Amino acid sequence: MLSESWATLWEKLAESQPDHVAVVVGDTHIKWSELNDRASRLAGALTSAGVGEGDKIGQLLFNCPEYLESAFATFKVRASTVNVNYRYKAAEIAHVLGDSGATVLIYHSAFRGVVTQVAQMLPALELLIEVDSDDDIKESQVLGAVPYETAISANEPMGPIVRAGTDSLLLYTGGTTGLPKGVVWSHTGLFGALAFTGYASMGIALPTSSAEVASVAKELNTSGRSPVNMTAPPLMHGTAMFLAFSTFVMGGTVVLLGGRKFDAAELLRLVQREKVTQVSIVGDAFARPIVQELERAEAVGTPYDITSLGRIVSTGATLSADMKRALMQRARNAVVLDMIGASEGGPFAVSMTMPGQDPGATAHFMATPLTVLFDETTWEKIAFGSDRSGVLAASGPMPDGYFNDEKKTAETFRTIDGVRYTVPGDYAKIDADGTVHLLGRGSVCINTGGEKVYPEEVEVAARAHAQIVDCIAVGIADERFGEIVTLVVSQTSGSNLKDKDVIEHVKSQIAVYKAPRYVVFVDQVYRSPSGKADYRWAKETVLAARIQQR
């Protein structure tokens, strides 16, 4: 297993392919030589400020070149990045930075107001670096903040140093059911995990040194086999950052949206212009607007050319069979890869639809060779085909654990019969042939009248209705049943669905007791920037609606 830092890997890539475009952000193209030089200068600024091994650096940034530059610089000085959701309020940002022990925050000037509040809450923040976001900012510059470009121009490039694969990065989970938690990934562990969708998928032996990584990347690039990967979620989401990492070591180019909100038209323009070979999305939340934009362009006679796409990858939320079909009708050479994964590791199951193949049923997954199903009480393996439900687990490369949380680490990363597994809490049944029936995350499981109902099941059934755009299922307290299943729904323009329409539709798909007893209609279902369901928002929406109806 390779035991070097990501910074060392990227330095070797910059040395071997200085003129290769590493990153495209909107209309900006960045070569490896440029990325390495600016990151090295920022690393010099960090070193001058006393930042080094083991320190934590928060990133409160929209998609921008500076996001990857600052990540590179962080790794160069052997510090750890800390991703911060830019939709968070001051208290939420303070929690992430305080929990991680961050002493540095790099932020866009658009966040001056909230950063001023956070700085007052966290005296441990010793260095603030502000990236100009070209906004019309009313707030004064945060006291003591250093302009990003000043930090770059005022410092000479930091030279390479000896680093280790034990260096780490902190990935904070979305916190859609509770406070965000920091997942600790060592550079070595993350390299091994990403090999699944990188080297292994191309039949390439895993490199064992940074020199080999650079050599393989250059050969793939020279032969025209290196990927051009577009990620729809923003960089502050783990899926996007990790895709960038895996793309770099394959000699490829990372393509990112330049806008601050997901824009299907921008995504498709970039796919067409940059000849993108892979696009990564998060379920129907991204697929549906992409399909709508494709249909709009076709209707006016200006269809997008997306024939370069060889793979469409989805993880983090359900990608329906209908959306797969619609995408594959336009990207006829693309393989659609739908995966069950988590910030804590995986994948736990995969659905692969080959060109010309019908995707079949929604949420039809197959176990991987590393997938195991455990009884959550005895922690004995459940045999595939037993018709028993259990918790999904996977062995293989995985994080070290949760930051400063031994109890949660022991619960999620379990060593059983001498093998370490990651068990994030997803429940499933697995058939004898390896077909995985995902039930959902245990932390949002609904207990109604003694019966367990997993939101994912209800949501998949509801979204099969042609007039339902999106939905989230939650449990609401009830005196008789303990909890009742409730559904927050958005519908297509012009539709006039009633509660009973949705309820009867779900009853026709799954067991009657799993159907919602109460439906709340909204203009748009709120999801995180990464596309994940926000169960806290859904519960608050339902409770507010019930109060209004009293």
Image: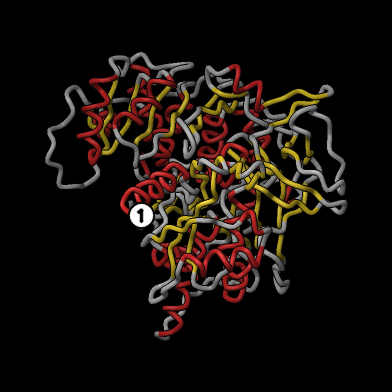
Judging by the rendered image, the residue that carries numbered circle 1 is 261
Looking at the rendered structure, the number of numbered marks drawn on it comes to 1
Q: Viewer-proximal residue, 532 or 76? A: 532
Residue 200 position in % (x across, y down): 74, 46
Q: Viewer-proximal residue, 3 or 443? A: 443
Query: Given the image, on which type of amino acid does mark 1 rest?
Result: Lys
Residue lying furthest front? 480
Residue 453 position in % (x across, y down): 63, 47
Residue 137 vs 434, above or below: the answer is above
- Residue visible at 77% across and 47% down in the picture: 429
Residue 253 position in % (x across, y down): 52, 51
Left or right, 419 with respect to 191, comes to: right
User: Which of the 4 image quadrants contains residue 507?
Assistant: bottom right
Left or right, 75 with respect to 373, comes to: left
Q: At numbered mark 1, what does the secondary structure look like: helix, strand or loop?
A: loop
Q: Viewer-proximal residue, 173 or 195? A: 173
Q: Viewer-proximal residue, 411 or 352? A: 411
Q: Within 10 angstroms of label 1, few (less than 14), some, or many (20 or more) residues?
A: few
Q: How is the image coloured?
A: secondary structure
User: Which of the 4 image quadrants contains residue 6?
Assistant: top right
Left or right, 132 with respect to 403, comes to: left
Is residue 117 visible in the rendered structure shown here?
A: yes
User: Which of the 4 image quadrants contains residue 154?
Assistant: top left
Q: Which quadrant holds the N terminus?
A: top right
Is residue 222 visible in the rendered structure shown here?
A: no
Residue 72 position in % (x across, y down): 45, 33
Residue 207 vs 312, above or below: the answer is above
